Image: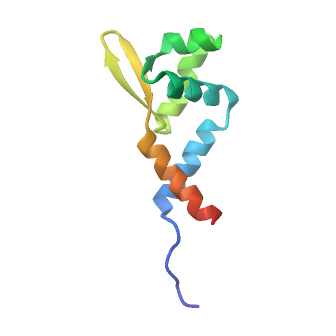
Amino acid sequence: MSKQGTLFNEEHLRLSATIMRAVANNVRIKILAFIDTEGETPVSPIYQSLGLEQSMTSAHLKILRNAGIVKTHRDGRQVVYSIDYEKLNKVKEAISILAS
């Protein structure tokens, strides 16, 4: 059997699977939508606007951060969250290849 060119990048597919598992939760989808709308934001506006507990919000943000979907930086005592759009674009590309 002859080997043909690979249609996908295995690393991108692994990253895509990790991210898809991380966003497969309604609360995390709402958190991402909030950050996407508001831009860089600390945790308090997220849990206050979505009516969540601070600890639950932080736990969900940790999952998103570990998956590489959100980035953080410190602003004084606060941790500020933003979406890593570059990483999400890689996922989009990997999924597009599989869907074609």
Identify whether 91 is placed above or below 1. Answer: above
Residue 100 position, x and y percent, is 63, 66
Residue at the extreme right of the image, as rendered: 26
Residue 76 position, x and y percent, is 30, 10
Quadrant for residue 77, please give it: top left
Identify whether 80 is placed above or below 32. Answer: above
The number of callouts visible is 0
The N terminus, quarter of image: bottom right
Identify whether 42 is placed above or below 93. Answer: above
Q: Residue at x 44, y 18 (%)?
A: 41
From the viewer's perspective, tell me whether residue 75 is left or right of residue 85.
left
Q: How is the image coloured?
A: rainbow
Residue 40 position, x and y percent, is 42, 22
Quadrant for residue 54, please give it: top right
Residue at the extreme bottom of the image, as rendered: 1
From the viewer's perspective, tell me whether residue 28 is left or right of residue 87.
right
Residue 60 position, x and y percent, is 57, 25
Residue at the extreme left of the image, as rendered: 76
Q: Residue at x 53, y 71 (%)?
A: 7
From the viewer's perspective, tell me whether residue 26 is left or right of residue 46.
right
Q: Residue at x 51, y 56 (%)?
A: 93
Identify whether 15 is placed above or below 68. Answer: below
Q: Residue at x 61, y 28 (%)?
A: 28
